[in-house]
Image (tube, rainbow, N blue to C red):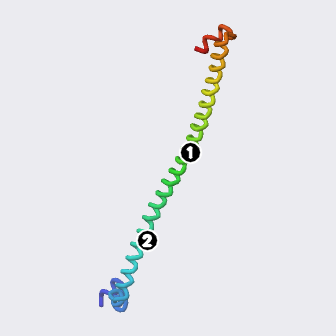
């Protein structure tokens, strides 16, 4: 048993190292290490997904805001167009009755 003097491993420790319990423990440790690594990878992936979702949510909010601005612009433009159309109709009506100054007549054509 000169080996035990070099390594400091007793025969009892050597027996345990090769025992079914030790083999079982090593296999459980390896399994839990694998599980921990898998969880770590899943956490990284979930964090990336969360970041993507946050980015998508921000884009969605920005798009919603822009859509509202476009809607307001369309309504304003429509209102302006209706106002212009009403003014043109008024000018045409005045022109038809002949009581319209010359400088305004050119606008109603």
Q: Residue at x 39, y 83 (%)?
A: 25
Q: Is residue 8 above or below residue 41?
A: below
* Mark in front: 1 vs 2: 1
Q: Residue at x 65, y 17 (%)?
A: 93
Quadrant location of the N terminus? bottom left
81 or 11, nearer to the observer: 81
Which of disc 2 and disc 1 is earlier in sequence?
A: 2
Q: Which residue is mark 1?
A: 64
Residue 85 is left or right of residue 60, and the answer is right
Choose top left, top right, bottom left or bottom right for residue 90: top right
Q: Could you tell me which secondary element the residue under label 2 belongs to?
A: helix
Q: Position of residue 104 (x, y in %)?
A: 65, 12
Choose top left, top right, bottom left or bottom right for residue 91: top right
How crowded is the residue under tag 2: few (<14 C-alpha within 10 Å), some, or many (20+)? Answer: few
Give the CA separation, mark 1 to mark 2.
Answer: 41 Å
Quadrant location of the C terminus? top right
Q: Could you tell me which secondary element the residue under label 1 belongs to?
A: helix
Q: In this view, which residue lies farthest toward the front?
A: 97
Q: Is residue 9 above or below residue 39?
A: below
Residue 32 is left or right of residue 59, and the answer is left
Q: Position of residue 53 (x, y in %)?
A: 50, 54
Q: Is residue 44 above or below residue 28?
A: above
Q: Position of residue 99 (x, y in %)?
A: 69, 10
Q: Residue at x 60, y 30 (%)?
A: 77
12 or 107, nearer to the observer: 107
Which numbered dot is residue 22? none
Q: Position of residue 24 (x, y in %)?
A: 36, 85
Q: Which residue is mark 2?
A: 36
């Amino acid at each position: 048993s000169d080996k035990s003097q070099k390594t400091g491993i007793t025969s009892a420790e050597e027996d345990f190292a090769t025992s079914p319990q030790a083999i079982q423990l090593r296999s459980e440790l390896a399994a839990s290490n694998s599980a921990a690594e898998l969880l770590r990878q899943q956490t990284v992936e979930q964090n990336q997904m969360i970041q993507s979702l946050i980015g998508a949510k921000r884009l969605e909010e920005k798009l919603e805001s822009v859509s509202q601005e476009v809607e307001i612009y369309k309504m304003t433009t429509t209102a302006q167009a209706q106002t212009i159309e009403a003014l043109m109709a008024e000018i045409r009506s005045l022109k038809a009755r002949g009581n319209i100054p010359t400088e305004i007549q050119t606008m109603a054509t």
